[in-house]
Every structure is written in C-alpha cells, then in structure tokens.
Image: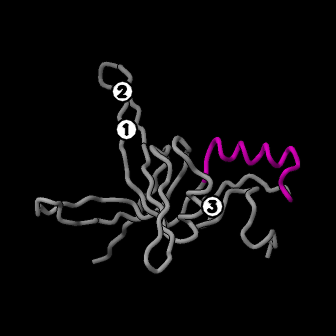
Amino acid sequence: MPSYNKVILMGNLTRDPQLSYLPSQTAVAELGLAVNRRWKDKDGEKREETCFVDCKAFGQQAQTLTQYLQKGSPVMIEGRLQLDTWQDKQGNNRSKHRVVIERFQFLGAAEARNQAERDTGSGDKPASRQSAPTPAGEPPAGAPSPDGGIPF
C-alpha cells in the first residue's frame, strides 16, 4: 500500500531556534512554530485557534534557520511528520509528533530587511524576490552565499 507523509505549514516562531550538534558534528536546530486558524462560527462571531508545532532541521538548513530567524519570525516549512518515543523519569512511555523540515522559505520581515539591505547597497548583488519555496538550506535572497558569491 502506498504511503505519503508531507506537511506544509506557515506561521511564526514561538522561540529562537536552538542549535546543537550531534556526535557526528551534524547541526540540529529545534524550533517551535505557531500556526493560526481564523473563522466565523455559526453565530457569525470571529474565532481563532492556534496550533503549536515542534520542528527540527538538520545540517546546513539548521545553521541557516538559526542564523536568520528569531522568535516571531514568519516562515513557511515543508517537511514530514516523525514520531519520537521515549520513557520519562517515572518509566512511562511517552511520544510526540514533530515535523522534520525538508524545505523552508523565509517570509515577511526577513524579506523586507533583505530588500532594504539591497536598496542601500550593502549587498554585493541585487536579487529578485523569490516566489517558489527556497531550496533546502539556502539562505534568503540577498543573504551572503557560503560559496563566496559565485553564481554557478
């Protein structure tokens, strides 16, 4: 039987990303995302609920997310659900779903800040606004590239 595990979320960070490293020196970033849902109930009253989601990124993505995002930053993530299981101090089995980030795109304030830097000439080269999701681990348009600005 076929399976499909894909999650796409857009929201704001609930806390600054926490960067750590595995024994293999692979970077790991843990972050919390708040996703809001707004609707009108049957009486026409506006309602809102917030879903809090824990997310995790690895490698260059983890470093990039930690470098450019902070609490309150808007971001779109694409990833997959993962079930983590463990035993607590009392020996009870615990579990939690989280999203493992595969792709992401910076939104809102970060894009505006990068555009302002380009407009004042502080960036090396102008970059067009991206409409497609940012490839995995790639910094936002206008951010210094890790390869020294070589476009190929």
Tell me, for residue 47, which label it has, or none. 2
Please give the name of the residue rendered at 64% of the width and 58% of the height, measured from the top-left corner: 132
Report the residue that reaches farthest toward the bottom: 24
The residue at the far right in this view is: 121
Residue 66: x percent and y percent?
56, 57
User: How far apart are the alpha carbons under marks 3 and 2?
Assistant: 32 Å
Residue count near mark 1 (Cα–Cα under 10 Å), binned few <14, some 14–19, many ≥20:
few
Residue under the point 69% across and 47% down:
111
Q: Is residue 28 left or right of residue 109?
A: left
Residue at the image point whose x is 79% and y is 71% from the top: 148
**Residue receiving disc 3:** 134
**Where does the magenta region start and end?**
106-124
Residue 97, image x and y in percent? 30, 59
Residue pointed to by mark 1: 50
How many other residues sit within 10 Å of disc 3, few (<14), some (14-19) or many (≥20)?
A: some
Instruction: Pick the quarter of the image with the N terminus.
Output: bottom left
Q: Which is more foreground, mark 3 or mark 2?
A: 3
